[in-house]
Every structure is written in structure tokens, then in C-alpha cells.
Image (cartoon, helix red, strand yellow):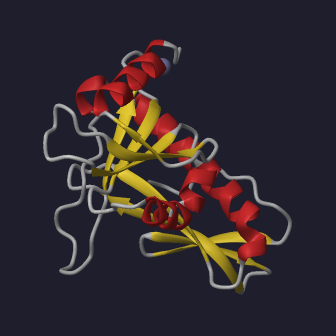
Amino acid sequence: MNPPQLQFPPGISLERQGQTYVIFRNKREEIGGVALTETPLGDTQLRPYLAAGKESDKTTVAFIAQQMSDVLLMHQAQKPAHLRREPYPPNNLPEGVKAFENKLLPCSRCGQFVAKLIFAEEVSSAVAMEDLAKKLELEAFVSAYPIWIIGAPDSENDDIAKHLTLQIAPIKGAVYWEHPDKMNQRLIELDDHHC
Ligand SMILES: [Zn+2]
């Protein structure tokens, strides 16, 4: 991905450092950035972050990350269908690093994403779900589509198991239990009404 044409607020600049676009104020004060990660299938994902102690710059970082995300989504939607791939959970992470499985669901007509599910099966309490939501706050803040976290099931039996579920974008909801069939129905409806 090449540096896109972005609109910067006054005093804000962007500098590429390896796979990260670092966001600076006055050229030297790092306020955050956007890390680019490649999936094993060659797709790019954006992961915005805030530098320590820069809570008050959240909106600026989110604003830039949102623009980068828009550019990326347009780029992906323009790819011919046979080159479009669904992002896949990374399988080559360093030992001890746990990645949550992300599933991005593209619209069946235009290819833009209609929703994202983050699978975190080992998260087994409402408190832990809220903790994870907090970690993903910035990502949720810049998301152009709804995001749900799917946590642990309440049963070993998939037919009846409900999972801890928490919507974090476009607005954050409350933790509840839901069977995957209901989520699937919702995703079908989002696709039906997308464009
Ligand atoms: Zn669409």
C-alpha cells in the first residue's frame, strides 16, 4: 500500500517507519500511528494505536486511520472478484503472541466490508469481554462497519451453545449471550441492505 492522499489537521504529519505510519505533531512528538499488517493471503489490515499518554489525541489518530481505512477499502473493492480474498487469521506469529481470529465479511455485490467478527473463544466473562473491548477501542472508533466480539460458548454442544457477544462499533453495546444462528441472520440482513 502506498501512502494515500490524506488530509492532515494543522501541525500533524505522517512518517513511514517500516510497516508503520507514525503520526507526529510538530514533526517530533509521536501521538500514535497506524501499523500495517499483511495476512498470509496478502491482504493488508490496519491497526491504529495511540502513543502512551496521548489520550487527548485519540480523535486525530482516529481521523487519519479512518482515511487510510477508506483508501484501503476502496482499493480492495476495486480488485477483480477472483483477486479479492477474505483476510485470514495470521498463522506465523511469534511464539506466545495470541492473535484473535478476525472475520471480515464483504458485501456480496460491491465487495466493501459490511461487518467484522472478532473471535475470542477464551474470553469467558462479561468483565473480560469489556477489557478486550477497551483494547480494541481505537480500532472500533475508526471502523466504517459494525464489529462484534464473539467470546466463549456456554455449552460444549454447538447446537444449543450461546456465545458471549459484544458489539463495539459503530456504537458500543452491552455484553449478552447469543446463538451463532442469530448472528448469521443479522449478517445476511446487513448484506441484503448494504447497497
Ligand atoms: Zn454493497
Height in image: 73 above or below 108?
Answer: below
Write the residue at 29% across / 24% down.
81
Q: Is residue 107 visible?
A: no
Q: How many marks?
A: 0
Residue placed most toward the observer, 141 or 172: 172
Which image quadrant for residue 38? bottom left
Residue placed most toward the observer, 93 or 28: 93
Q: Position of residue 168 (x, y in %)?
A: 55, 48
Which image quadrant for residue 120? bottom left
Which image quadrant for residue 111? top left
Write the residue at 72% across / 85% down.
29
- The quadrant of the image that shows the N terminus is bottom left
Left or right relative to 155: residue 30: right
Residue placed most toward the observer, 61 or 152: 152
Write the residue at 71% across / 79% down.
54
Residue placed most toward the observer, 50 or 9: 50
Q: Position of residue 104 (x, y in %)?
A: 37, 40
Q: Position of residue 59 (x, y in %)?
A: 75, 61
Left or right relative to 5: residue 3: left
Height in image: 181 above or below 163?
Answer: above
Q: Position of residue 56 (x, y in %)?
A: 78, 73
Height in image: 195 above or below 85?
Answer: above
Kindly give the residue lying farthest to the right in the view shown.
10
Q: Is residue 3 visible?
A: yes
